Image (spheres, helix red, strand yellow):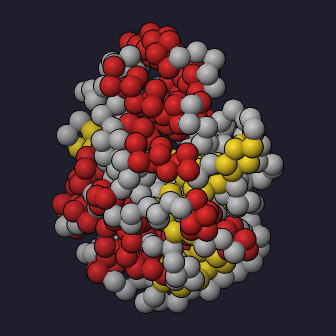
Amino acid sequence: MDGSAATVDAVAPGATGKRGKTRRGVFSMAGAAGGTALLAACGGPAAQEQKSALNNAPVTLQYYKRGTLTDTNVEALLKDWTAQHPTWKVDVVQGITDEKLAAALAGGEKLDLLTYNYAARTMVLAYSMLRPIDPYVARDKYNVKKFSEKEVDLVGRYDGKLWALPYAYGGNATALFYNRSLFKEAGVSEPPADWNQAWTFDQFRENARKLSKRSGSSLSQVAINGLSDAPLNTLSTMSALSDAKIISDDYKKSMVDRPETIQVFERYADLILKDLVTTTSPGADLGSGNAFLNGKSAMHVICCGPLAFARQIKPTGIDWGFAPLPKIKYSSPDFQSVLTLLPNSGANPDHGWELFKYVIEDARLGTLEERVPAVLEDAPDWAKASFAEYPNARPQVLIDSIKVARPVDKIKYHPATTELYATAKPLVEGALQGKETVKQAFTTLHQQFQTILDRSPSGK
């Protein structure tokens, strides 16, 4: 590996060297490189799970994680663990990528815990590296129902077994930020705060045109930032809002040539190319930097965790709030779980299971990564604590998003997902730039996707 291991007392890659403080019993502040992060302390119902009967003999656990925390937050994450298990040390290897994970497995590394962004079926089919957790769940009577059942079924179960559980949500579109002042100037009412009352897509388009400003052939203000900037993200986002499918539920067939899918993406392309309401629309002249932060975009799509972007808004003085995504057939966030997994190569699987539960409890890891919690009962306290300094934010939108979230398209969880996205990139981008029609691009994409799917493992 690359030597990026960090124990509780060591410095993680990219670390600041600063040390933070935590306080049990409340959501408390822990220093982070980009600002502050909220850390949920132990003591709630989750902490009452059955304790392990393992002895206190010294062990060292190898914990591999995607993404990088500062050394301060590594300490914060493991502070209670160290207090509870002073002889069970944890080496945290951060910044894991597909290449680093494959190298670690090929090199015989003993992984006791992994937190990653691929579904269990992907990890089983691509790496054959997981240990099913059903025996541990049964032994400890671990409450799996505290997570979204449909999400656990999608990302945690495969071939009749439970392999993984989410610790938090990432995703391409967790909700929208909107600028109240720009809405008021345009005479547009604020978006509903209820996902069940979200704007229809036609209402969204109508209001988006009002929220954009034109000067001749130039756009000096647009309705939305972040929706069109990463075209590949639309493959899952538009599918979450409709019945459009990219690949079939059995992972074996390309569905991008279906009329329903083409129609949805044609409507999306119209936002960019005909309505001229996005940051990538022809004629957009918005200067440098983030258009929402610069007051030149009325809405912004949240990627991943919303708290970090809220902090960026604060110095601007923009009066903002959260809003649901518009409804094509459904109004839903585009969530993807980030997962806790138990590798089958670990030297200490029982200890690894204890660490597995620990990073999930009280939204420990998710909060430090500033993500939306995966455990339903953690969401209200997390949202209220995270956005307490933003009284007009409407955090209930985020709380409710967990309840209404639809499973994303299966392209996210196919073993060939990286190749599928790389193949889609030039065609999707070309269609959204008007180089060819959506139908033309997606007809070609269908053929290429099917070739990949026919030679890739799809599982049962």
327 or 110, which lies in front? 327
Which x, y percent locates residue 423? 56, 20
Q: Residue at x 66, y 37 (%)?
A: 280
Q: Nearer the viewer, residue 219 or 419?
A: 219
Q: Quadrant of the C terminus?
A: top left
On the rendered image, what quadrant is the N terminus found in?
A: top right
Quarter residue 195 falls in:
bottom left
Horizontal side of 275 relative to 11 (left or right) equals left
Residue 282 located left or right of residue 40: right
The part of the image, by quadrant, that contains residue 18 is bottom right
Is residue 221 rendered to the left or right of residue 264?
right
In the rendered view, would you say 326 is above or below 423? below
At 37% from the left edge and 76% from the top edge, which residue is drawn? 380
Can I make out residue 125 in this image? no
| Residue 129 % position (x, y) | 42, 39
Q: Quadrant of residue 455?
A: top left
- Residue 439 visible here: yes
**What x and y, as percent, mark residue 135?**
22, 55
As drawn, the residue found furthest toward the right would be 288
